[in-house]
Image (tube, rainbow, N blue to C red):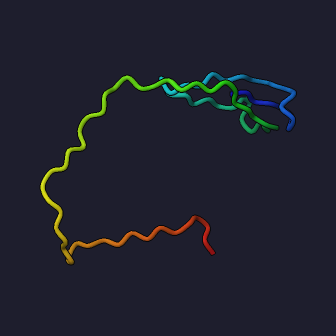
Amino acid sequence: MHLYDDGACAAEYNPLPLSSFVEQCHNVQPPGRVLGSKSMTDPAYMPGTCLASGGEPIGEAQPNADTAVTFCCIPPFAG
């Protein structure tokens, strides 16, 4: 990821390497610094190394009016 002082991605001040292998929290220094723009280049997919496991159904589903739950999906900031 590339961070820039200007809005045209011309004055880069700090490239940051990013990956999903380790925690990638980076503070912008100094605190309160204004970012003009950012860009990400050359993304690369690296497949995982773990085989899928678990998720087998257990028991049986039965309706129960005493414990029924209704989920409402509302778009954020609906007015």
Relative to 61, say whether 25 is above or below: above
Relative to 57, say whether 76 is above or below: below
Relative to 63, say whether 11 is above or below: above
Q: Which residue is situated farthest in the left direction here?
A: 59
Relative to 62, say whether 23 is above or below: above
Q: Is residue 23 left or right of residue 40?
A: left
- Quadrant for the N terminus, please: top right
x 21%, y 77%: residue: 65
- Quadrant for the C terminus, please: bottom right
Q: Is residue 11 left or right of residue 27?
A: right
x 72%, y 29%: residue: 29
x 45%, y 25%: residue: 47
Q: Position of residue 27 (x, y in %)?
A: 64, 31
x 50%, y 23%: residue: 46
Residue nearer the viewer, 9 or 36: 9
Q: Quadrant of residue 66?
A: bottom left
